[in-house]
Structure formats: structure tokens, C-alpha cells
């Protein structure tokens, strides 16, 4: 089989066979063809597309391009969650231990942040000593002992995705929906899950700003996942404003720990957490309904078992458990600044993308992959959409290493904020369920 023929076939609008797609995945995983040929094929897919069966077979082939996680000896049902990314979206940090406390095995494979969206791995690394790079034996042992593990993609899980993802980023082929679907689901298929919940974000801070595009992606993900035999639900959630009250790595760890301690101040964060968790438990057969699953999750907050399991995870992965008991030990930025309201009224908008950009300018995110992070940098959002504010009242607290960063962050934050004279009602985070 010549890769040149595979490129030409897709260029001309042909439909790939399972064997051809297996060859593509194998070539990407093992370096059997030059990057320029893989790049040409990616562009052909972007221009010509793939049908549903092709997308399923590509995903299957990419998942089979390396090892599987191998959790068969664990008798608990296995479930995971994937988010398409947003601002302040640290839900995985609280969701994984709570789901484990409810009886699930949760191999929570996560990524890093780039641009205005944060990454779970970066948040975890704000805990001193926490290791996110684990080998398969460590992941298996930890899921067996504690019910979950929080880790980054290994070199042996879906290695075809690692190659194709990097090439997509470098060849302007990221928007191709079949490639997005295969990238997301190949890693989940390699985990050999019994259930998967997808958090597809919609709004200014999301990949897809409009509901139509997000809905189309969600439907494609659910169809492909079901084609792989993996029960899946997609939850469309709002990302017009940041999720929760904190944006930044250590700050979002703090928020997750406060949620696990029973704090309900961040109502939107809690709504998203319980909706995703409820569906995980429903799909895995541990609750009759998503609502019952959400209540079971709440009970694991109330009895402290979620927090205890998170502490066990931090210890097992080399992190300092002292920060779990004393959040003041988390990294702090050198300087802080309060941002005050210029007028009275109601917060009518808080653009998530601009707040994410503000976090990058403060040092909490990356404008490029190699950029170092200030783990203590970020924003505390004291006022969100719907909240009443008085002139001179503190809207947010910014954290950064120097005054220049604070100036840049404040300017971007103020551009994100709108205060109106009329009361505005905050909307539900959960927009739609796609099954």
C-alpha cells in the first residue's frame, strides 16, 4: 500500500477503507512516512471530509496504534470526562475524586493549556511535587488503590494522535471535524471505558462560539463514540463568562478544594460538576437517573470522602498533601491588585475569552507552548453576570509578578466587563444534553 495513493484517494473525494485508515494510523505512530505526506493527507481530509463510518474507523485505528490502559482487572465500572476547554474550567480536579468516591474507576487523562484556555496538568503542577507523567503500571496501581488517577497522555497510549495533533497544529488543519473527533475519542477508546461524558463548551471562551457548531461537534462525537461501543453523552455548557470564581492554576486548585469542602459560592461551577458527574454515574449503571447521580455526588462532598480521595491522589503522585489542609500554602504571585467598579449597576457581561487573555497577560497561561507559568498568577472574580455592584466596590483581584503585568491584565479584564443599569439574570450553565 502506497501512502501516495491514500492521499490521492481522499484528495479526489474517495472513501477510505478500514485497512487504509489503519495504515494511516500505523504510519503516524511509527514514523513510516514523511511528515509532509501525513500533512498532505490531513489537508485532503480538511477539504474533502470523512463520513461517519470513516471517522469511526480512523478513531479505532488511532486507539489501536499503541497500548491500551489495561484496567480489566479492576471490577469497578470505568468512566471518564472530556472537556473541549474553557476559562476557569477546573472541574476535573473535583469531579475525578467525587466520581471515584461514588464507585467509579476514573482514569482522568488530561492536557495542558494553551492560549486563553487552561490545562488540568498545569493546575495540578501548581501543587509542589505533583507528578503528572506516569507510566501505565503507575496509573493502573493508582486507579486500583484510590479509584482514580490524574495524568497526562503517555507515549504509548494512542501514539498516532500525538503525531497527527502536532501536524494539524502546524498545517492549519485543526478545524477538520473528523480529525477533532478522532483525536478526542482515540485517547478515550484506549482507556477502554464503560462510559464517557463530554463537556462541549459554547460561547466566547470556547473553541466554538456558536451553539450550532458546538452541537454539530457534540453529535459527531456521540455518534462516533457509540460506533466504537462506548456509551456516551455530550453536555453542552455555557462559556460566555468564566466558570467559577477563579482563573489561574493554583487559584483553580483552591476552588476545587473549597468545593470538595462543601463551599457552594461558585454555583455555576457546582452545577457543571454535578451535571457531568450525574451523567457519568447514570451511564456507568451506578444511578438510575442523572439527578440521582448528582445527589450521590453531593453526598460525597458532604461526608468528605471526595476530599480524602483527592488527598490520597496527591500523596500517591508525589505532591505535598500539606496544601490540601492549608490552602494558603499554594503558590502565590508576588503582587495583587483590586479592580474597582467605575459605576454602580449590574454585571451584564464578563467575556470569557478576554478574561482568559487577561490571565495569560498576568502570567497564568501560555501564549506559546514553551512559555513558563507563574502558578500563583490569575484572577479572583468577586462579581459575575447578574451580580449587583456599587461604585468603588471590588470587582476582581488580580495576581501577577509585577506592576506591568497587572496593568496589562487589568486593561484586558476591564474590556471583558460590562455594567448596565438594568438587572440581568444569570443563565443556567447546562444548555442541552445530546445522547
Image (cartoon, rainbow, N blue to C red):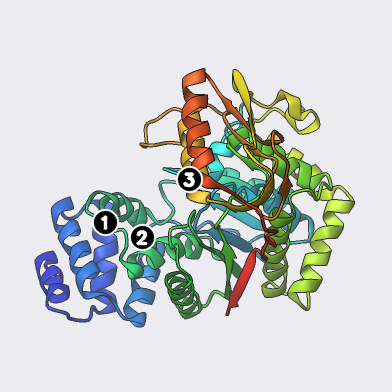
Q: Are marks 1 and 2 in contact (CB under 8 Å)?
A: yes
Q: Name the residue under label 2.
A: 65
Q: Is residue 133 visible?
A: no
> Viewer-proximal residue, 350 or 193?
350
- Badge 1 crowding class, 10 Å Cα cut-off, few under 14, some 14 to 19, many 20 or more, is many
Q: Is 4 or 345 nearer to us in this picture? A: 345
Q: In which quarter of the image is residue 7?
A: bottom left
**Which residue is pictured at 29% across the width and 62% down the height?**
25
Q: Which of marks 1 and 2 is in front?
A: 1
The circle on residue 426 is none
Kindly tell me whether residue 16 is visible in this rendering.
yes
Secondary element under disc 2, as helix, strand or loop, is: loop
Assign a secondary structure to mark 1: helix
* Residue that sits furthest to the right in the current view: 303
Residue found 35% across the figure and 74% down from its top: 55
The residue identified by callout 1 is 28
Residue 93, image x, y percentages: 66, 47
Q: In the rendered structure, which disc, 3 or 2, sits on the residue that comes first in sequence?
A: 2
Q: Of the residues under marks 3 and 1, which one precedes in the sequence? A: 1
Residue 146 horizontal side relative to residue 108, left or right: right
Calculate the distance from the C-alpha at mark 3 to the C-alpha at mark 1. 36 Å
Q: Residue at x 51, y 36 (%)?
A: 359
Quadrant for the C terminus in the image:
bottom right
Q: In this view, does 49 lie above or below 110?
A: below
Q: Look at 83% across and 52% down and name the residue there.
A: 301
**What's the CA distance linking mark 1 and mark 2?**
9 Å
Q: From the image, tell me which residue sits under label 3.
A: 354
Name the spot of residue 305 as percent of width and height, x first. Answer: 84, 49
Q: Which residue occupies the foreground of this view, 423 or 71?
A: 423
Total label count? Answer: 3
Amino acid at each position: 500500500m502506497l501512502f501516495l495513493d491514500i492521499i490521492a484517494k481522499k484528495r479526489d473525494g474517495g472513501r477510505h477503507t478500514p485497512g487504509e485508515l489503519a495504515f494511516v494510523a500505523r504510519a503516524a505512530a511509527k514514523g513510516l512516512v514523511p511528515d509532509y505526506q501525513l500533512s498532505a493527507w490531513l489537508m485532503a481530509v480538511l477539504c474533502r471530509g470523512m463520513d461517519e463510518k470513516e471517522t469511526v474507523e480512523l478513531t479505532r485505528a488511532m486507539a489501536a496504534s499503541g497500548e491500551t490502559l489495561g484496567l480489566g482487572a479492576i471490577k469497578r465500572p470505568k468512566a471518564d470526562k472530556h472537556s473541549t476547554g474553557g476559562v476557569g474550567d477546573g472541574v476535573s480536579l473535583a469531579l475525578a475524586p467525587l466520581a471515584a468516591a461514588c464507585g467509579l474507576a476514573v482514569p482522568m487523562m488530561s492536557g495542558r493549556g494553551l492560549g486563553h484556555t487552561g490545562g488540568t496538568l498545569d493546575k495540578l503542577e501548581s501543587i509542589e511535587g505533583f507528578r503528572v507523567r506516569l507510566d501505565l503500571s503507575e496509573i493502573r496501581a493508582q486507579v486500583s488503590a484510590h479509584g482514580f488517577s490524574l495524568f497526562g497522555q503517555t507515549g504509548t497510549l494512542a501514539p498516532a494522535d500525538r503525531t497527527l495533533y502536532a501536524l494539524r497544529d502546524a498545517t492549519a488543519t485543526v478545524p477538520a471535524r473528523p480529525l477533532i473527533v478522532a483525536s478526542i475519542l482515540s485517547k478515550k477508546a484506549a482507556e477502554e471505558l464503560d462510559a464517557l461524558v463530554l463537556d462541549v463548551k459554547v460561547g466566547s471562551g470556547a473553541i466554538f462560539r456558536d451553539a450550532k457548531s458546538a452541537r454539530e461537534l457534540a453529535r459527531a462525537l456521540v455518534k462516533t463514540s457509540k460506533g466504537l461501543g462506548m456509551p456516551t453523552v455530550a453536555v453542552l455548557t455555557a462559556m460566555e463568562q468564566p466558570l467559577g470564581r477563579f482563573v489561574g492554576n493554583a487559584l483553580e486548585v483552591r476552588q476545587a478544594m473549597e468545593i470538595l469542602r462543601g463551599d457552594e459560592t461558585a454555583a455555576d461551577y457546582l452545577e457543571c460538576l454535578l451535571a457531568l458527574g450525574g451523567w457519568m454515574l447514570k451511564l456507568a449503571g451506578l444511578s438510575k437517573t442523572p439527578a440521582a447521580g448528582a445527589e450521590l455526588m453531593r453526598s460525597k462532598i458532604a461526608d468528605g470522602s471526595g476530599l480524602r480521595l483527592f488527598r490520597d491522589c496527591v500523596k500517591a503522585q508525589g505532591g505535598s498533601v500539606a496544601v490540601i489542609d492549608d490552602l494558603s500554602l499554594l503558590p502565590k504571585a508576588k503582587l495583587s491588585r483590586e479592580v474597582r467598579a467605575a459605576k454602580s449597576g449590574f454585571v451584564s457581561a464578563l467575556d470569557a475569552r478576554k478574561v482568559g487573555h487577561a490571565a495569560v497577560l498576568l502570567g497564568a497561561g501560555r501564549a506559546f507552548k514553551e512559555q513558563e507559568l507563574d502558578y500563583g498568577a490569575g484572577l479572583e472574580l468577586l462579581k459575575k453576570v447578574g451580580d449587583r455592584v456599587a461604585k468603588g466596590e471590588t470587582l476582581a483581584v488580580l495576581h501577577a509578578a509585577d506592576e506591568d503585568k497587572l496593568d496589562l491584565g487589568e486593561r484586558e479584564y476591564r474590556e471583558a466587563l460590562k455594567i448596565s443599569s438594568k438587572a440581568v439574570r444569570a443563565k443556567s450553565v447546562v444548555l442541552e444534553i445530546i445522547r
